[in-house]
Amino acid sequence: GYSESQQYGSLAYFSDNDWHQVETTYNITKSSVTAQSEYIPAPPSGEYPVRLYWPDQEAWPDNGFQGAIIPTPVKDCNNCQNMTPRNFPLGVSMDNNSTVFTFADLTNLDLSKVKIATQPTHYAVQVSRAELVRFQALINGEKVSEAMVLVEDAVGNDLYRVTTGTDGFTPWIALPSNFHLDFRGLGGGDNPDGFADDEYEDSCSDGKDNDGDLLIDTNDPSCDYSAGTREMSLYRYTAYRFGYGYYSGEFTLEENSLQETANLENVAPTVMVTQDDGHSFRRVVNITGSAHDGQLANSYATDELAQWDQGGYVHSVQVKNPFTSSWEDAEFAIDTSGAAEGEVTRFNRPFSSWYYEIDLTGMAGEGDYTFEFRSFDGIEYSPVVSRTIKLNTQPPTIFVNSPSSFSSHDEGEVVFEGYAQDPYGCPSECNKDIGLVYMQIDGPNYQVTTPVQTNEDGTWGWAWDFGSRPRELSTYTFTIWASDSDFCNGFTDECQPVVLTLTIDNRNSQPTISVNQPFSGIRISSSTDTLLRGVARDFDGDVTRVDLEVKDVSNDYVTVFEKSTSEFSEDGEWEMNWDTTQLRHDAEYLLRFRSYDGIDYSGWVEVSIVADNPPNAGNNQPTFDSSEWESEITLYCDSESNSVDKCTTIEIDLKDYFSDLDNDIQFISVYNDTSISTDDRHPLVVGVGTDGVARYDPADMQFFDDNMEAWTLNNVIFIATDAWDSRANSDPVTFRVVPLQFSIQEPEKSWFDDDEYAIYTGIGLPGKQVSVLIGGVPVNNTIVSEDGTWELGVPGSRIKGDSSTPQFTYSGQTTTVESISKGEPEDDSTNWYLVVALALVAVLALASLAYFSGFVGFEIEGDEIQKAPVEIPEGYGDDEIAGENNPLERYEDHPGWLWDPSSEEWVPDPDYNE
């Protein structure tokens, strides 16, 4: 360099040198030199063994550090080779404004022999007294060779980079323990005097932060001369060897040698398994994964960063399979990373991928098996990772319950049902591994495979809609098989499929159509938008169109109107609007409807209507309001009654539903469609009075039919006619007649306390009264509800004595039910004397009955005994018995009794005296 400009300084390290026949051993200018463990020869008189210079002016901030020094560059670029001398221990750094001499363990040298030959500037020359320090690297108590130790001062400047030897120790290095400068302004001496050995020329006046507390020299409380303390040197170090571990520490250096031990800390490796628990394997288990040592980032900028982060490499991955009892017998996974042993780069590392494979064919049956994995980095093992896998050794079996092979199908779809079996999970959870059932369909120019879901118990079902297939009769083959986690997924594989041959009849079915409005025979009022609606369906497709033809009946059925619609709801409902203002009044028209499915037409559905289009253009047609109209009314009839009011009746005030703006409704009648016979009796039994009230009593139908089931009137229609013979129809109403007979449902128990009720229920004619009596005295009554049911309670307090027998009256008839008693009955002990007595009485009574009635015959040997009739005295006919034209006969062998031939039984003889 040049004077007053930045220059390259020398950075030198001397150790264990032998010096002979030298006058000045170290003559240093604008450089940084460290010397240790040497003998310094004594110089001639007037000379000094160490001379230190800084010939230029002071380099400091106020002059922009003119004349500053920097180390010689060791790299020309970031990616260029580092030219630092091999095994050079010092950090490539130096003070830019000082000549520095650091010495340790130099024999025959002290501060009085270090000559500072420079101008009196603050920091131009520094003399650092140093101590010998070395480091030992251990891991788990074992010596670690080739471990690198980086040493920094208190503010982070790199000082040394040394490596441990086979004994685990680094070489001894010199670390300053005190700093000495010779400059003006210090008390206690003649300064500067060319030497840095005065009282205050130490670390409290060196301009450095030696202990890292960010306080310098006398600003640091550690610099207290009265207490004999000064600022001590703090050093931090980091020990590291790739594959072993890392350690960082610090120490404060006293004025003596130091040996520091770095116990390296190893980060355990990590092993990862790709497959989750429950992963399924088919006979051969192949488990994959990865492993790394230390920490692993997503990416690295350099190989060095990857090595620092991971701190080592995985040596092996051990696997303990279900048939291995200890780790000593464990097997090893195969490294598939492709990396060389110990090679860690930014992109790869040993065991970045691995696999373990074992063939369990014949070794194990279907079930769950647990594998354990751990990795080893040469120092420690990773935590154990376990995986429980599913082993599949057998394919599932399929069964088809329906349809049967060679069956025919013509309803648009074929429904398949069956079940599958698989041994995994047995015996408690058989079939849990059943997956999809596959249906492979082969037919004319057709092949498709469809997966079908199964149920938890292995059953399955599926419907094949063949409506889109060609409209023809064809034969199809269905190949059906089941799958599980590893067998037969998408193809038959090792499975034994069920093959069905089915005949598919997809020939087209005719569509259908029905007309909901108007009803046949109805009278339609003229309108520009008369609504026609109905439903059209096709069982093997969709209806695409509904056609309408209107024919004039009285004019040779000529077609007067045609229209079509292609708009349908999801349920097949359709609607059309028709302008009927041009129809002739009171003329009959035939409406014909048919549907079309794109292939075939349905049959025609015909509806006959009469046009209501009176000539008076200003007339307002009667209208019908259906908002409160009931479409069905239920009536009840007592099937066992002979009363004239055996049925409920209905009255409908039609004036509430029909109206006319001209207020000229002339009459309301019951409609009778002459084209059908089902409504012929409607006008005969349903009457509409001049008051506009319609009345129906179902009992009137008995004149035509005794069967009450036939008394229901379906779709009764009323017609209102105005002065211009314009008419309006009501919506149909059905009078539903329900036959019933009076019944009584008795309570579940037969005894009741005073505060309880015996609840009786039953069925009867709505509106009728049901009464209950006990001993002829009324107890309670109720009216049968509108739905034909009734309920009645008898208070327990109305039971007379121990028990009473209720009697029910209904519509003139009386019904007696079982007796009910008061209070819960008590179990009495059996009176055997009474039982015997009653038994004897019963035997005697039977004997008497047998004797007098001939119930028992006795066959006696001997002469036959003849019965001799006895004449009844004259005048006997005056009494009740003789008054009958049936004389009684008396027999001597039956004293006290008379024989009545008409009833063929014995009667007491009123004239008999014992």
Image (tube, grey):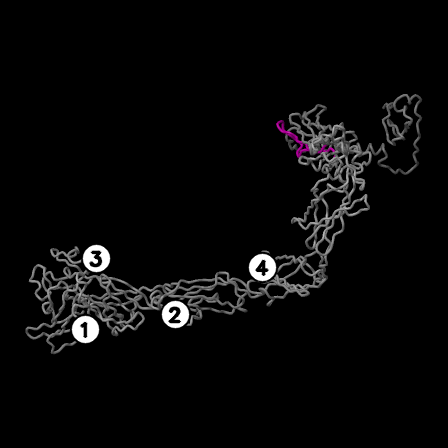
Which residue carries the number 4 mark?
431
Which residue carries the number 2 mark?
315
Find residue 504 and report its image quarter: bottom right
Position of 628 with respect to 348 (left or right) is right
Element at label 1? strand
Q: Is residue 831 visible?
A: no
Q: Residue at x 64, y 25 (%)?
A: 797
Numbered range of the magenta stretch: 740-764
Please state which amino acid type lies under the numbered disc 2. His
Distance Cα–Cα, label 2 vs label 3: 45 Å
Q: Which numbered tag is attached to residue 846?
A: none
Position of 701 with respect to 748 (left or right) is right
Distance Cα–Cα, label 4 vs label 3: 75 Å
Query: Is the residue 389 above or below the residue 754 in the image?
Result: below
> Foreground residue, 866 or 714?
714
Which residue carries the number 1 mark?
14
Estimate the x, y position of residue 715 in percent, counting from the top left.
Answer: 74, 39
Marked residue nearer the N-terminal end (4 or 3)? 3
Q: Residue at x 62, y 57 (%)?
A: 460
